[in-house]
Amino acid sequence: MRKLALIALMAFASPALAEDVTVDSILGKTLEEVQASLTAMGYEVRKAEMEDGKIEVYFVRDGEMGEVYVNPETGAVTKLDLKG
Amino acid sequence: MFIVTRQYSGRESAREIAVWDPLVRLIHWSLALTILLNGAFLDAESKSHEWVGYIALALVGLRLVWALIGPKHARFSAFPPNPVRAINHIRSMFEGDRTIFISHNPIGAMMVYNIWLSVIAIGVTGYMMTTISFFGVEWVEEAHEVIFGWLIFSVMLHVAGVLFDTWRTGVNLVRAMVNGRKNIPEWHDVI
Amino acid sequence: MKLRLWPGKTKERRATILAGLILLQALCALFFIGDVIEDFRENGHLDNPHLLLETVAAAALIAGVVFLMIELRGLLSRMSDMQIGLEIAHGHLAEVIESFFDEWNLTIAERDVAIMILKGLDNDTIAQVRNTASGTVRAQATNIYSKSATDGRAQFISVFVEELMAGDISSGNGAGPASMSQSTKKPAEKDRPAL
């Protein structure tokens, strides 16, 4: 019960406790899906396009910038570049 | 404008004039190298691309300071930005004028300012892309790429212009930018 | 005093080294400034001693660049002054040379070459400056010696050295066409030894 409450609490938690994108993240198979996933995690999407057959998205959160490349076939992150 | 034949005096012989000092030449070729590196060899997403860009900015900055406090031929006063003069210069070229300018000629001057401003714009937009406010912002990236395209076009025009003027006046401008001296053929007026 | 065309290799080399140092220092300053800016953006303040050191280093390097620029400008100015000084010293001699060339009926190209011979350039260098072949210059030089009735380079030059040593050179200032007709004798009337 307690665990459930905690999980529920986390789901409505402030952005400071939001999920981080990692090299293991599954974000989606289309530009829209990936953008939606990132936005749900609290990231601001700056730019999204196809590059070299991969979905490339630029995002910003809490003063940190990053780029992520996603394989549209698997929806998984192929490259993550966090710029701090 | 025709050169009036006058009684020969020593000063009208073919002569070499020291024009481009070592710093001007060093900056010129270093800048060309940075443009070549960033344009043709370095990956646009790499750290070295960024650094070469900042070096290019520093080179232009250095040149601008030199144009303020340097020797005569390197200063802004030797080649002021003047579109009217540039157009007049083109017109007189077609009329057979063979006046030789010690420093950049009026149209060359416009090209020089064009290249400097372009490099600055490219460098600044490049830097902007590393800031939070402009990271991933479309117009900044577009500007960076478009102005770079313009720069490459300008460089090609610049090379063509240099070769053309070398042919037209008989002064080897490429060699002048290597060893600093312009070899003025006889009977030419020099401004 | 050797009538050299250029102020000398040492000054040129020095100027080039100065330019290189200016560039190098500017790039080093860029490196430190870049570091400071990056750290400032990350931390928002500059009280870290490491950063302070970098700021001081950058400032020192920039001061160095400006100082060396002024030095280089001075050096270049001295180099061009020497060049001008030489040309002024030539000032009086120019009229004399002209009258000789007139007397000998040298062509325009031959006068060009003759001046360079007087300046101490060898045939190959003259060919380079004039953008012609060495053979052309050699032929022109031969014509010059023949027209001036001299045996070769050394003797040709000595004709003018004689003029320099003959006096009346001290009245250097204001040597224009008017004074020239008074002070210069026509070459044909002059006593020319060793002919």
Image: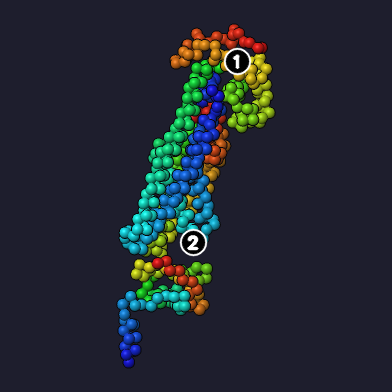
Q: Chain of mark 2?
A: B
Q: Which secondary structure lies at badge 1?
A: helix
Res. B11 in view: yes
Check the image and report above or below for C65 versus C96.
below
- Residue at left offset 41%, top offset 54%: C32
Check the image and report above or below for C156 versus B34.
above
Count of picture labels: 2
Check disc 2 and give the amino acid type.
Ser
Q: Which secondary structure lies at badge 2?
A: loop
Check disc 1 and give the amino acid type.
Val
Residue that mark 2 sits on: B46
Q: Which corner quadrant of the image does residue B139 belong to?
A: bottom left
Q: Which corner quadrant of the image does residue C191 belong to?
A: top right
Residue A27 x/y as whole percent: 44, 77
Please state if B21 lies on the left or on the right of C155 as rendered.
Answer: left
Q: Which corner quadrant of the image does residue B71 belong to?
A: top left
Please state if A43 lies on the left or on the right of C146 as rendered.
Answer: left
Check the image and report above or below for C90 versus B129.
above
Residue that mark 1 sits on: C159
On whether disc 1 and disc 2 are found on a single subunit, the reply is: no
Residue C162 x/y as whole percent: 58, 14
- Residue at left offset 35%, top offset 58%: C49
Foreground mark, 1 or 2, reads 1
Neighbor class of circle 1 (other Cα within 10 Å; few <14, some 14-19, many 20+) is some
Q: Chain of mark 1?
A: C
Residue B38 x/y as whole percent: 50, 55
Q: CA distance from mark 1 to mark 2?
A: 69 Å
